[in-house]
Amino acid sequence: MPETVPAWKFWHPLPFWQVLVVAFALEIVCTIPVVALREGLGVGIPTWVGAAIGGGLMVVVIRAIAQRRLTSTK
């Protein structure tokens, strides 16, 4: 009988360290351009905008990777 996965584990079957690596990479990639625009060009974009975009992308990308891994193991 297959074991049930809790609904909050959107990264199943990925190991947690891969989730952390993807999350860190996306946060850096999304935050650095916002900070560069703010500090370099003086555009008034708050830093949290880049972090929010990175967080949203993190859920979408990790879910897509997990879904691809899940279908490849079946």
Image (cartoon, rainbow, N blue to C red):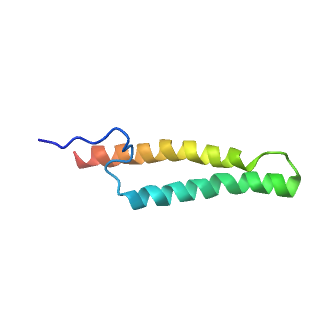
Q: Is residue 42 left or right of residue 36?
A: right
Q: Residue at x 87, y 53 (%)?
A: 41
In which quadrant of the rendered image does the N terminus lie?
top left
From this viewpoint, which residue is outermost toward the right? Answer: 42
Quarter of the image with the C terminus is top left
Q: Nearer the viewer, residue 22 or 69?
A: 22
x and y, in percent, of residue 51 in the image: 64, 49
Residue for point 41% across, 48% down: 65
Left or right of 73 in this view: 51: right
- Dividing the picture into quadrants, the one containing residue 67 is top left
Q: Find residue 64 and report its horizontal and vertical position in percent.
A: 42, 43
Residue 2: which quarter of the image?
top left
Residue nearest the viewer, comparing 48 with 73:
48
Q: Position of residue 20 (x, y in %)?
A: 47, 58
Query: Which residue sits at x=55%, y=58%?
Result: 24
Q: Position of residue 38 (x, y in %)?
A: 82, 52
